[in-house]
Image (tube, rainbow, N blue to C red):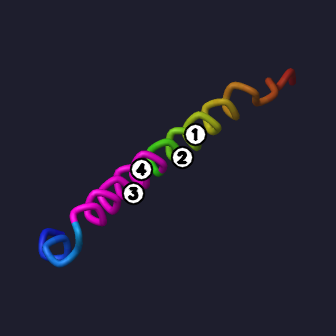
Amino acid sequence: MRRWCARKSSSVCRMSAEKNRVDEETAESRSRIVDLQYQTGLLCKPVSTA
């Protein structure tokens, strides 16, 4: 990434780094949401009374 940044302005590099950071946080958040949805699904399963 340094080579690419060396050819671009520092503001573009900062913006790209920030976007990458936000994208990573978003991916982690989505993964956490999926985990929580799965856990919620397990908790909400109807109990068999047979």
Q: Are marks 2 and 1 in contact (CB under 8 Å)?
A: yes
On whether residue 12 falls in the magenta region, the answer is yes
Q: CA distance from mark 2 to mark 3?
A: 16 Å
Q: Which mark is residue 19?
A: 3
Mark before the other along the chain sequence, 3 or 1: 3
Q: Are marks 1 and 4 in contact (CB under 8 Å)?
A: no
Q: Is residue 15 left or right of residue 31?
A: left
Mark before the other along the chain sequence, 1 or 4: 4
Q: Which mark is residue 33?
A: 1
Return the residue at label 2: 30
Highlighted range, magenta: 10-26
Q: Tell me if residue 12 comes above or below residue 31 in the rendering.
A: below
In percent of width and height, residue 9 lies at 23, 69
Return the residue at label 4: 22
Q: Quadrant of residue 41?
A: top right
Mark before the other along the chain sequence, 4 or 2: 4
Q: Quadrant of the C terminus?
A: top right
Q: Tell me if residue 7 comes above or below residue 20 in the rendering.
A: below
In percent of width and height, residue 12 lies at 30, 66
Q: Are marks 3 and 1 in contact (CB under 8 Å)?
A: no
On whether residue 20 falls in the magenta region, the answer is yes
Q: Are marks 3 and 4 in contact (CB under 8 Å)?
A: yes
Q: Which mark lies nearer to you, 1 or 4?
A: 4
Q: Is residue 26 left or right of residue 46?
A: left
